[in-house]
Image: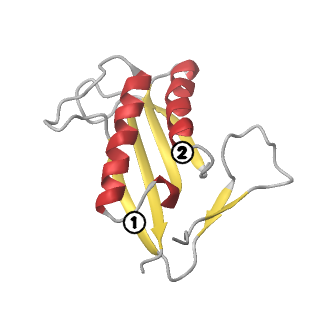
C-alpha cells in the first residue's frame, strides 16, 4: 500500500538528530490528529509508575491502537511530540529511545520536551502524533 508521508532529510543541518527534519503529505491525504497517547491500561490506571521507559512503551502501544482505529500505523505518522515530566535530560533520552526504537526506520520529525506535570496521577510520558493516510 502506498504511503502518504515523505520524510525530508537536510544535507545542510546536523546529522546528530535521530529523526528527519521535515515531512510532507500530498493534498489528497487524510490527516489524523491523535490525542496524546498516555501510559494507561484498559482500566485507565497509569502503568509502570516511576519508570519512564515502561511508560513510554505503554504510550507507544496505546498510540498504535489509536492509529489502527483510524486506519493507520506508525508508518503513517508525519510528526510526534514526546512529553516527559522531568527536569533530567537522561530521563528525556530514556523515553526518546523507546519511541525512536518503536518507529525504527520511519524516523519522523519529532520534538522531545521536558514538562513539569502531565494529566494523570503518576504519569511521566505522553506522545502526541499526527498521521497522514491515503484512503483506497
Q: Residue at x 50, y 37 (%)?
A: 99
**Callout 2: helix, strand or loop?**
helix
Q: Is residue 64 above or below residue 70?
A: above
The residue tagged 1 is 32
Residue 45 lies in what quarter of the image? Answer: top left
Q: How many numbered discs sit on the rendered protein? A: 2
Q: Is residue 65 above or below residue 131?
A: above
Residue 108 position, x and y percent, is 59, 52
Residue 97 position, x and y percent, is 56, 30
Query: Going from the N terminus, do you reach mark 2 or mark 1 first?
Result: 1
Q: CA distance from mark 2 to mark 1?
A: 17 Å
**Callout 1: helix, strand or loop?**
strand
Q: Residue at x 36, y 28 (%)?
A: 55
Name the image quarter holding the C terminus: bottom left
Residue 132 seen in this snapshot: yes
Q: How crowded is the residue under tag 1: few (<14 C-alpha within 10 Å), some, or many (20+)?
A: some
In the rendered image, the residue lying farthest to the left is 43
Amino acid at each position: 500500500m502506498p504511503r502518504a508521508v515523505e520524510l525530508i532529510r537536510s544535507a545542510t543541518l546536523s546529522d546528530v538528530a535521530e529523526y528527519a527534519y521535515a515531512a510532507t503529505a500530498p493534498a489528497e491525504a487524510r490527516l489524523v490528529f491523535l490525542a496524546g497517547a498516555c501510559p494507561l491500561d484498559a482500566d485507565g490506571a497509569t502503568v509502570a509508575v516511576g519508570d519512564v521507559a515502561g511508560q513510554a512503551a505503554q504510550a507507544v502501544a496505546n498510540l498504535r491502537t489509536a492509529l489502527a482505529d483510524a486506519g493507520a500505523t506508525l508508518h503513517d505518522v508525519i510528526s510526534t511530540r514526546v512529553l516527559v515530566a522531568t527536569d533530567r535530560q537522561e530521563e528525556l533520552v530514556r523515553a526518546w529511545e523507546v519511541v525512536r526504537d518503536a518507529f525504527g526506520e520511519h524516523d519522523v520529525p519529532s520534538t522531545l520536551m521536558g514538562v513539569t506535570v502531565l494529566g494523570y496521577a503518576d504519569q511521566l510520558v505522553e506522545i502526541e502524533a499526527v498521521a497522514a493516510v491515503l484512503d483506497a
